[in-house]
Structures are given as C-alpha cells and as structure tokens.
Amino acid sequence: MSRRKKPLIKRHDALQATMDKYRHRPFDWATGATCIHMFRFHARKMGHRIEAVPKLTGPIDARRELKKRGYDSVEAMFDDLLTPIPVAMMLPGDVSVLPDDSGLGGIIISLGASAIGYAEGAPGMTLFTQPAAVITKAWRV
C-alpha cells in the first residue's frame, strides 16, 4: 500500500497550514503578509517550486516586480505558472484572482464553496462566502 498522501488530504493539509499561518496576520507589505506571499506559502505546501517573493514596499513595487518578470498582471503570471481551469472545477486549494483594474487583483484560495484571502479594509485573512459570483478565472494548484 502506498504511503503517499491522497490528493484531497494533501490539499486539506496545505490549506490548514496556510490558514494557521495567515489567519490572524493583517495585510502588511513590510512583514510579507500579502496575498502573493500567502499564495507562495500555499503552493509550496502543495509541492510546487515557486521562487521567493522579493521584498515589496507597496503596490507600485509589486507591479514593477511583475513587469520585471515579464507579466502585466497576476493573472498572466498564473497562466504561466499554473494550469487554468473552469471556475466550476475548482477544488479546495485551487486559486483565483479577484478582478480589478490595477493588474494585481486579490489572490484567493478556494475552500470549496468559499475561499480565503485578503480584502481591502479587513483586519486579516477574510472568508469569501460566494467567490464564484465574482471570479472569472481559476487555476489548479
């Protein structure tokens, strides 16, 4: 019998580790408590090799880093790093980006029918209860 974790158990464990680390951390560029940092932590827990996130001082710096790597948005970066999937096929642990005009967008991680991420004005990690109503693209992690 194989000792490898079942895929859904691996997803659960990665989600739990991500929630444990970021649940009570307020969004903060200085301490690395941002949605891109949360995504990298989660993706690494899922077994992906994602390069380190450089020190970011704010959204202008984040856009500059995206451009330096050849991306015009977080969505374009995810298209390159991950496999796009229909939103309806999201499993717990898959990711999406909340649409916005800046190209950054808020990265959310699916919990199934809900999702976690950071939201403007919220003190810490936020639970999104109906993310499928606003997201248009998703990626398999």
Image: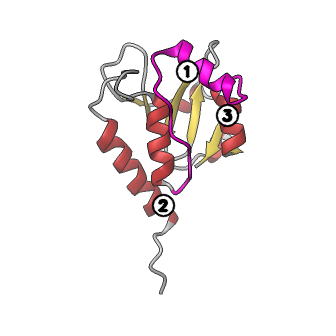
Q: What secondary structure is marked by label 2?
A: helix
The answer to the question of whether label 1 and label 3 lie on touching residues, with beta carbons closer than 8 A, is no
Left/right of residue 69 with respect to residue 16 in the rendered view: right
Image location of residue 10, percent across then percent down:
45, 61
Which of the 4 quarters of the picture holds residue 122? top left
Say which amino acid is labelled 3. Met
Residue found farthest to the left:
24
Q: What secondary structure is marked by label 1?
A: helix
Nearer-N-terminus badge (1/2): 2
> Which numbered marker is on residue 62?
1
Say which amino acid is labelled 1. Ala
> Which numbered marker is on residue 77?
3
Residue in the image at 51% along x and 40% along y: 52
Residues at marks 3 and 2, CA–CA distance in whole angstroms: 25 Å
Residue in the image at 67% along x and 25% along y: 68
Query: Which residue is denoted by mark 2 in the rendering?
Result: 8
Left/right of residue 98 with respect to residue 114 in the rendered view: right
